[in-house]
Image (cartoon, rainbow, N blue to C red):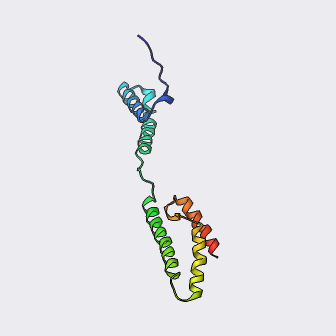
């Protein structure tokens, strides 16, 4: 008979959870008085591990972030369209202002299609440049 050494640190994925459940079952069936006192603590640890393994896949605020990002993208696109429309106005001051704003907007190409962090920092810089 060969005894294999079990290294708990090498258990992968759900193997650790299954190991703990099997250990609890074996100890419960063995009904050893000194071990029985420790079984409630082991059961609590198993329950906490199960809870940690069954976390929701999506992050808590991801839907709200996506909605807010879509609104921000629409606002940025609306700004671009307003500037393009203002370039075709007859009033010279409005045309000149639109061309100045367009120069600033050209420094931030495809801003709405970037990642959230890049887009946020780009919009902050854009707002600072427009001031």
* Residue nearest the observer in this picture, 110 or 64: 110
Task: Give me the residue at 55% from left, 89% from top.
Answer: 91
Task: Give me the residue at 52% from left, 88% from top.
Answer: 90
Q: In this view, does 87 lie above or below 114?
A: below
* Residue nearest the observer in this picture, 15 or 109: 109
Q: In this view, does 46 lie above or below 22?
A: below
Looking at the rendering, which quadrant does residue 20 occupy? top left
Looking at the rendering, which quadrant does residue 96 occupy? bottom right
Q: Position of residue 3 (x, y in %)?
A: 44, 15
Outermost top residue: 1
Number of marks in the image? Answer: 0
Task: Give me the residue at 53% from left, 81% from top.
Answer: 87
Q: Where is residue 108 in the image (x, y as percent from the top left)?
A: 57, 66
The quadrant of the image that shows the N terminus is: top left
Q: Where is residue 101 in the image (x, y as percent from the top left)?
A: 59, 76
Q: In this view, does 89 lie above or below 71?
A: below
Outermost bottom residue: 91
Q: Where is residue 113 in the image (x, y as percent from the top left)?
A: 49, 61
Horizontal arrangement in the rendering, residue 24 relative to residue 94 (left or right): left
The quadrant of the image that shows the C terminus is: bottom right
* Residue nearest the observer in this picture, 121 or 106: 106
């Amino acid at each position: 008979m060969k005894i294999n050494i079990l290294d708990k640190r090498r258990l992968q994925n759900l193997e650790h959870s299954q190991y703990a459940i099997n250990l609890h079952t074996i100890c419960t069936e063995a009904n050893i008085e000194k071990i029985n006192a420790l079984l409630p603590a082991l059961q609590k640890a198993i329950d906490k591990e199960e809870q940690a393994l069954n976390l929701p896949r999506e992050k808590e605020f991801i839907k709200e972030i996506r909605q807010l990002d879509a609104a921000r993208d629409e606002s940025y696109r609306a700004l671009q369209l307003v500037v393009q429309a203002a370039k075709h106005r007859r009033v010279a001051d409005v045309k000149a202002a639109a061309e100045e704003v367009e120069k600033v907007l050209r420094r931030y190409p495809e801003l709405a299609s970037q990642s959230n962090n890049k887009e946020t920092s780009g919009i902050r810089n854009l707002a600072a440049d427009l001031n």
